[in-house]
Image: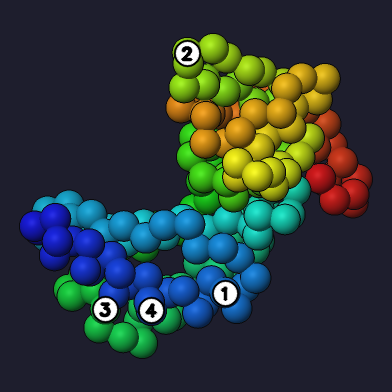
Amino acid sequence: MAAGRSQAADERVRAVVAPAVDAAGLYLEDVRLVRTGSTTVVRVTVDLDEDVVGSLDSDTLGEVSKAVSSALDDTDAVAGAYTLEVSTPGATRPLTEPRHFRRARTRLVKLVLDDGSTAEGRLVDVVDTADGPAAVLEDGPQVPVSRVRKGKVEVELRRLEDEADDTADGEEG
């Protein structure tokens, strides 16, 4: 498909699935249609609201997947056979927008700034400043998001194990 045509198809599908995602109380991060042979793969990426700390659980992901599938089945937004993939951005997604930084609160992050320097630490907050949103690192600098050339969440295996234990014990993680 041509780039413009693909983008138009993405937007058409986005308009169909957005109400189902909104009804689940989730944020629609991205919609992509990818052609693989005679089948189209519809990739829908959803996330929790930017004010929520934590991860999207598999039950909620399954429920929104069913709702998105139903919404697509009720329309002709995707021509022909398609495969639906509904997922989250994942723990290691790049931090490219202010909402990504807000979602990464409490996580260990590594930032490469526009001057080549780096800042690393636990992201405790994102505050609005005169220069726009700024990431506040624990025991570290306040970094304007506009200065971040590359940002990512560092995966902490020990922390993931602790969250899994808390969830198994019935606590929210």
Residue farthest bottom in this picture: 74
Are the residues tagged 1 and 4 within 8 Å (C-beta)? Answer: no
- Report which residue position mark 3 lands on: 77
Residue farthest left in this picture: 2
- Taking depth in this image into account, of 126 and 85 the one nearest to the observer is 126
- Report which residue position mark 4 lands on: 16
Whole-number angstrom distance, CA of label 2 to CA of label 4: 42 Å
Residue 39, visible in the rendered structure? no
- In what quadrant of the picture does the C terminus appear? top right
Q: Earlier in the sequence, mark 4 or mark 3?
A: 4
* Horizontal side, residue 74 vs residue 133: left or right: left
Whole-number angstrom distance, CA of label 3 to CA of label 2: 44 Å
Q: Earlier in the sequence, mark 3 or mark 1?
A: 1
- Report which residue position mark 2 lands on: 116
Of marks 3 and 2, the one in the foreground: 2
- Taking depth in this image into account, of 74 and 96 the one nearest to the observer is 96
Q: Residue 57: x percent and y percent?
A: 68, 54
SS category of the residue bearing label 2:
loop
Q: Amino acid at mark 1?
A: Asp
Q: For the point 52% across and 29% down, which residue is it?
A: 147
Q: Amino acid at mark 3?
A: Ala
Q: Amino acid at mark 4?
A: Val
Q: Amino acid at mark 2?
A: Gly
* Horizontal side, residue 122 vs residue 81: left or right: right
Are the residues tagged 4 and 3 within 8 Å (C-beta)? Answer: yes
Q: For the point 14% across and 61% down, which residue is it?
A: 4
- Taking depth in this image into account, of 11 and 46 the one nearest to the observer is 11
